Amino acid sequence: MIYPRLGDPRADLSWHRRQLDVAHFAETATSHRFATEVDLVVVGGGITGAGVALDAASRGLSTVLIEREDLAFGTSRWSSKLVHGGLRYLATGHVDVAWESAVERGHLMTTIAPHLVRALAQVVPVMDDTAVRSALLTRAGFLAGDVLRTGARTPSNTLPPAHFLSADKVRALAPAIDSSRMRGGIMAWDGQLVDDARLVVAVTRTAALFGARIITHANVTRICGDGVDVHDTTTGTEFHITARNVIAATGVWAGELDDRVHVHPSRGTHLVLDAGRLGNPRAALTIPVPGMSGRYCFLLPRPDNTVIAGITDIGVDRIDPVPPVPDEDIEWILSQVNTVLSRPLDRSDVLGAFAGLRPLVTMGAAGSGDTSDISRKHLVSRAPEGHITITGGKLTTYRRMAQDAVDAITDTPCITTSIALVGAAADLPRRSPGFFATDPWVMRYGAEAERVRALAWLLPNPDSALDPVADHTSVARVDIAHALLHEGAKDADDVIERRLRLDTVDVDRSVAQAAVAEVVDALTGELSAGVR
Ligand SMILES: Cc1cc2nc3c(=O)[nH]c(=O)nc-3n(C[C@H](O)[C@H](O)[C@H](O)COP(=O)(O)OP(=O)(O)OC[C@H]3O[C@@H](n4cnc5c(N)ncnc54)[C@H](O)[C@@H]3O)c2cc1C
C-alpha cells in the first residue's frame, strides 16, 4: 500500500495554488515558445473526475482537472452517502454490477479510505402485515450479499454478516419504530461515508499529491482536437490547454460537451431530521415501498445527530445546478417512513431537504459505432473527435469507473487499489462496526486530525477555535481554516456547502455563516499579505 506522507504539502490545495496553475496555462497559451502540452485534461470535479485525475496522475500522466464551480458541486454531494455492496443490482439480476460494487466497497472500507467510511447496520423491520415470503426473500438477498462480501474478501470484522433480529433488538437499535406492529427484523451491514463531498476532496487532494493540477471555478467551454478552451469564471479570462487526451466526467451535464450522450436525469430527494426526534437510532431502517418491488425508503442516522430520510426517483427534464425540492417529494417521503413509526413525522420535523440528479445516460444513434458501453451502470465512450466521456455509475464505484476511462488512453497499469487517500494511515486504530471515530477531527480527517487542530494557533481567540460553530455539527473554526488552507475552498460558499456541509440544516447555516465569514476574512487578509 502507498500511504500519503502526513503533512505532504503537495496534497494541500489552496486558492493561491489554483491561481498559479491558471497563470501557468493562461501565460503559456499565449506564448508558443513555452506552450505546455499535458497528457490529460479531466473535465469535472465530482467523484468521477476526481477519481480519473488520481488514476491518471498515479500512472505517471501529466494531468489537469478543470471544474467549473467547486469540487463536489454536482450530484456527488447530494447522495445518500452510502458505500453499498450492490444488493439492489442482485435483485434485478445484474450480478456483475453487484460484484463490482461489493469489490469497490471492500477496497474503500479496508484500504483506500477506512477513515471516511464506517459499517452501518441496516434493519428491514418485519411488521404484522409483512408477508412471510417477502421476509424470506429479504433474508435470501442478504445471504447473497454475504456471499459477495466474502468473495470480495471484505472481512467480517469490517462488515459483519446478516442475521435475523428479535423485536427487542430492533426496538433498541431504532426506538421510533411502531413496536405494537413489529415482530422483529433482518439486519445487514453496508458502508456509510462521513460525507460524500469529503470523499471527493480527499480523492482530489490525493491526485494533487501525485502531481495533478486542480483548477476550480473554470468552465471548459469547448473540447477540440488538441485540448480544451477554458473560461476562468472568477476573472473572465479565456485560455486554451493543449492536451493529448481529454476525459469528460461531467455527470448530468455530459450532453453539453458531447451531443451524442443523452442524459435522463432522475431526481432523488432526501429530508434531514433531528435524530433525537427518532430516539437517536443506531441503525438505519430500510422500509419497503408498498406495491413497488425492489423499492425502499431509508432512515439513515448520520454522525451529526441528524437522520436523513429518502429517497425519491423522479425523472426530470430540466438540469438545475442545485435542484429545488418540490413539496410532493417531502410529502411522499414522510408518508413512506411513517408506515413503520409509532409517532408519525410531519413537516415541522423536517430540518432541511436536498435533492440531486442521478446521471442516467444513453448514447444517441449517431456515432454509436465508435461507442463502447463498458458496463450497464457506467458508460465510457469515445467521441469521433477523440475525447472520452465517462458517466453513469455511482459514488461507490468511482475508482473502477476511473480505471476503465484511463485504460482507454494508456497501457500503463492502474495502481489505485493500492493507494490510500490523504488521511488514511496503516496505524489508525480500527473502529468497531457501527461507529465513527468519537473524536470529530479523526472522524473527518483521519491521520490529519492533529494537523487540523493545530490550526487554532493561526486564528483569533485560539482557545475557542475548537468549539462547534452551530447546533447540529461538531465543525469548529479550525475546520474552516483547513478548508481554506488545505482543501481548496475559495470562499464562504465553498466552505459551507462543499467542505463542511453546514448547508443541510437550514437554521445551522445562518448561525455558521458568521463564523465562516470571520475565518475567511482573517485568513484571506493573512494570505494575501503573505502573497504580496
Ligand atoms: C439522490 C442520489 C443519491 C445517491 N446515493 C448514492 C449512494 O448512496 N451511494 C453511491 O454510491 N452512489 C449514490 N448516488 C450516485 C452518485 O451520487 C453519482 O453517481 C455520482 O455522484 C456522480 O458523480 P459524477 O462525478 O459523475 O457527477 P457530478 O458529481 O455531478 O460531477 C460533475 C461535475 O462536472 C462539472 N462540470 C460540468 N460541466 C463542466 C464543464 N463544462 N467544465 C468544467 N466542469 C464541468 C460540474 O460542475 C460537476 O461538479 C446517488 C445519486 C443521487 C442523485
Image (cartoon, rainbow, N blue to C red):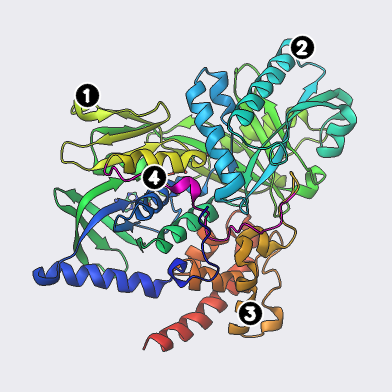
Residue drawn at the location 41% of the way across and 26% of the way down: 376
Q: Is residue 392 visible?
A: yes
Circle nearer the N terminus (4, 1)? 1
Whether residue 468 is situated above or below residue 316 in the rendered picture = below
What SS does tag 4 mark? loop
Between the C-alphas of marks 2 and 3, the distance is 57 Å
Q: Percent from the top left, x then y, of residue 285?
A: 72, 34
Q: CA distance from mark 1 to mark 2?
A: 46 Å
Q: Position of residue 188 (x, y in %)?
A: 71, 31
Which span of residues is magenta-colored? 409-431
Which circle, 4 or 1, is nearer the viewer?
4
Residue under pointer 1: 365
In the rendered image, the quadrant that contains the C terminus is bottom left
Which numbered disc covers residue 132? 2
Which is nearer the N-term, disc 1 or disc 2? 2
Q: Dot 4 corresponds to which residue?
A: 414
Instruction: Report the magenta stretch's main SS.
Output: loop
Q: CA distance from mark 4 to mark 3?
A: 39 Å
Residue pointed to by mark 3: 456
Q: Name which residue lies at 44% across and 35% down.
A: 393
Numbered disc in front, either 4 or 3:
4
